[in-house]
Amino acid sequence: MGGTGFIGREIALAVAQAGHPVTVFHRGHTLGDLPATVDRVLGDRRHLSQHADQLRAAEPRVVIDVIAYTESDAVTCVDVFGGVAERLVVISSQDVYRAYERFLGVGNGTLEAVPYTEEAALRDHLYPYRDRVTGGNSWITDYDKILVERAAMSDERLATTVLRLPMVYGPGDRQQRLAPYVHRMSDERDAIPLEAGHADWRWTRGYVTNVAQAVALVCGDDRAAGRVYNVGESDALSEAEWVTAVGRAAGWSGRVVPIERSQWPAERQLPYDWSQDLVADTTRLRDELGYTEQIDRDEALRRTVEWQRDQDRHADPSEEYGAEDRCLEG
């Protein structure tokens, strides 16, 4: 379900390479460069039930739902595949944890302990992005992976596995998370400033191909039925360490410079509590199913940097770097 996008395509490839026949349901907006052996069903997720007969005819053993964003998405998926498939694998997010809520500045301000396991407290408030969306009729207003997980796990028609993903990076990332740093490195900036709290902040990340391999592993192992797993690299780098690692991949010899918040440009301050790290414990997936990353971080970043440079999205340095230069000079 959603097998041609950034993460979905890699999952479809990983499952196919593991020797399983694969059928992908997608809108047809992107082809995904998948093997000819992969079958396709075209349709819109918002009208999933209209394609129920065609999807059931594929006789899936495992359904991987990459694009379940709302409670309604999960309910419809189980309605379509319940009684046909044996198992549902739901791609969730680590934004379900209370730590993420604290990071957003919501709640009583008490920091959550990290690394958090799959048993850690979930957010106290639903719909984490509803107040941050301008305009109506956006799916993001009803987005909540907590409700997706609950709807899928509570329905006995399908045994469900939940995978809580970290920040996923790699070629094809529509958000181009490495772009701000790679742009500066390509422009041969001597230094990249970071707000001091941001520089120290830690976040669990995962390379898209490795994440896809975790999904494929879960699909092929029935021990994963009824289980919830955090996915991500075993060590969470600070942002300063992350930028340094990106720099090595980019052949950049500059330095990361922490800047105190009082000196950081007001227009560049982000509305996050950097004192709340977002670090997941991924021991369960590794111990129970034997998961290990197939591509190390250095190689993953080299591939991602190469792809990012191909995007050729350089900003105007005369406009972008003025505030940074003043920080560095101060």
Image (cartoon, grey):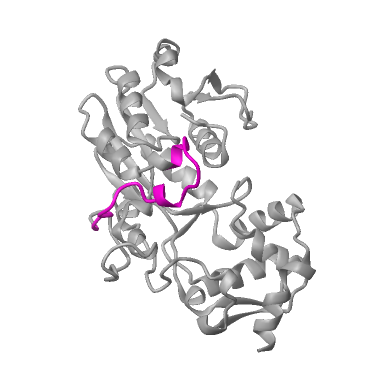
Task: Judge whether 26 appears above or below 245 on screen.
Answer: above
Total marks in image = 0
Image point (52%, 41%), residue name? 7
Write down the region rendered in magenta.
120-140
Residues 103 and 218: in front is 103
Outermost residue toward the bottom? Answer: 330
Q: Residue at x 46, y 25 (%)?
A: 45
**Can residue 220 be seen in this snapshot?**
no
200 relative position to 73: left or right? right
Residue 91 image position (x, y, % from top left): 40, 40
Residue 99 quadrant: bottom left
Q: Is residue 327 left or right of residue 82?
A: right
Residue 149 within the magenta-colored segment of the rendering? no
Locate residue 48, reporting x and y percent.
43, 20
Percent across and percent down for residue 279 are 38, 64
Does the magenta run of residues contain 127? yes
Residue at 55% across / 20% down in the picture? Answer: 40
Choose between 313 and 117: the one closer to the eye.
Answer: 313
In the figure, 145 relative to 325: above or below?
above
Which quadrant would the C terminus be assigned to in this image?
bottom right
Magenta stretch: dominant secondary structure: loop
**Residue depicted at x 65% and y 66%:** 181
**Residue 314 appears in the figure:** yes
Q: Is residue 74 left or right of residue 235?
A: left
Place residue 240 in its image quadrant. bottom right
Position in image of residue 191 (x %, y %): 68, 79
Above or below: residue 14 compared with residue 180: above
Q: Give above or below for 31 relative to 209.
A: above
